Each structure stands twice: as structure tokens, then as C-alpha cells.
Amino acid sequence: MADFCTVQNVEELLRVDITDLEAIRSCQRAITEATAAIRNYCGQYLELVEDDEYTFDVRPARWNLMLPELPVTEVSQVVEDGETLEADDWELGLYGQLWRVGRRWTAGVQVVTVTYSHGYASIPDDVVAVCMRAAVRAYQAGLKSLESAGVPVIASKSLGDYAVSFASEGTNEGLLGASGTRMLLLSEKDVLDKYRQVLP
């Protein structure tokens, strides 16, 4: 399972070199978390997967089944109630809808198995950009936490006669430290909305 961006992408966005081993590990962890957040929000794997199998429970009177991963690039086999269907027995429609031709799907539990390929051979640029920005926020939150020795509410520090001031705790996300960093912003979710499963 590959991540949607790289440490080099984060370096380019921040215009810094990340060379320390611990910093690289921290950055990679932030990238993996951002990738997972994107997959969770979209409800999609997004990366290209070939010959994946999915088995449906089919309710009575269904003409169409929704393949869960998009985009669907190829359907190679459809087995209904133990019988492999011919290519003219079904038709692939928009948004991963698999239509039965001439009659409804057989109703039952785990009764239709579809082998299909889905996802993107190259992750789209806008998804990569969202991953980069989310990873940068998580990485920078980790750096801020390191600088304040893990104390999330430090508002400022002074060097002469050393002084530290603390912000009031409250419920503001900015006072929750690295664990309170918002992984995906609303504007980024707007970008990702087109990659979510669309119900007809």
C-alpha cells in the first residue's frame, strides 16, 4: 500500500531539507496518516488494483449492483449463484453500477461475485496536493510539540531570565497540540468530494 506523496514532496512544499533520520521518520508517518485520512474520507482505495474480487449480498428485485471501488477500469468476470455469466448478461454503467441485462439479479447472501480492476495508475495531482498539505500540517505539529517538550499550551518563551507563558486550555483545537491538528481542511474535502462513491 503506497502513500499518496513523498518526503521529497514535503521538502519541496516547505522549501527545507529533511535529512535527520528521526525527522524523516516523523515526516513519513505524517504522510501515511494523511494518506489514510484521504482514503477514509473518500471511502476509496484510489490506487490501481487489478483483478480485485467483491461478493455481494443481493436484495430482491435488484437490477443494478454498486461496485465499491472507483473508477472501475475493467470487469473481467461476473459469477451469479455459481454460474459464470457471459459478457452480454451484464453491463457496466456510470459510477460503478453493474446492471443485469434482461432480468433482475438473483437475490441471496453472497450470491454474486465480481472480479474487476479499479483505481488510478497514477494518483491524480489534486489528491497528491491535498496529501502534501495535510502531511505538512501533521509534520509541523510534531516539530512544534518537540520544541515545547510535548506541552501543548505554551504560548511564548523568553531567553533572558528564562520565562514561559501558557495559553488557557479551553476547547480551541489550536491548544490541543499535535493530537488536535485537523488532518483534512474543509477546502481539501471539497477537492476530494469528486473521488467519493456517488450513489445514484
Image (cartoon, rainbow, N blue to C red):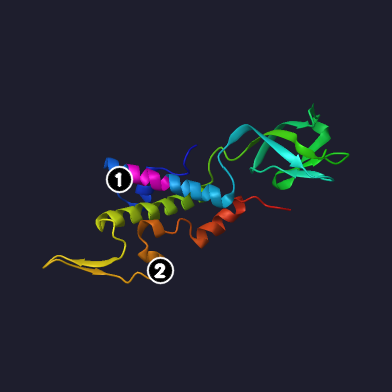
Residue at coordinates 46% horizontally, 49% vertically from top-left? 34
- Where residue 74 appears, x then y in whole percent? 68, 35
Instruction: Please name whichever residue, 123 or 200, is drawn nearer the observer in this view of the structure.
Output: 200
Q: Is residue 124 visible?
A: yes
Hey, what amino acid is under mark 2?
Asn
Nearer mark to the viewer, of 1 and 2: 2
- Where residue 188 appears, x then y in whole percent? 51, 57
> Which residue was labeled with disc 2?
172
Which labelled disc corresponds to residue 23? 1
- Where residue 112 appears, x then y in whole percent? 75, 35
Element type at mark 2: loop
Instruction: Please name whichever residue, 14 or 37, is drawn nearer the observer in this view of the structure.
Output: 37
Q: Which mark is first along the chain, 2 or 1?
A: 1
Q: 95 above or below 137? A: above
Q: Is residue 27 magenta?
A: yes
Magenta span of residues: 25-31
- Where residue 62 appears, x then y in whole percent? 82, 45
Residue at coordinates 55% horizontally, 39% vertically from top-left? 47
Hey, what amino acid is under mark 1?
Ala
Cα–Cα gap, marks 1 and 2: 27 Å
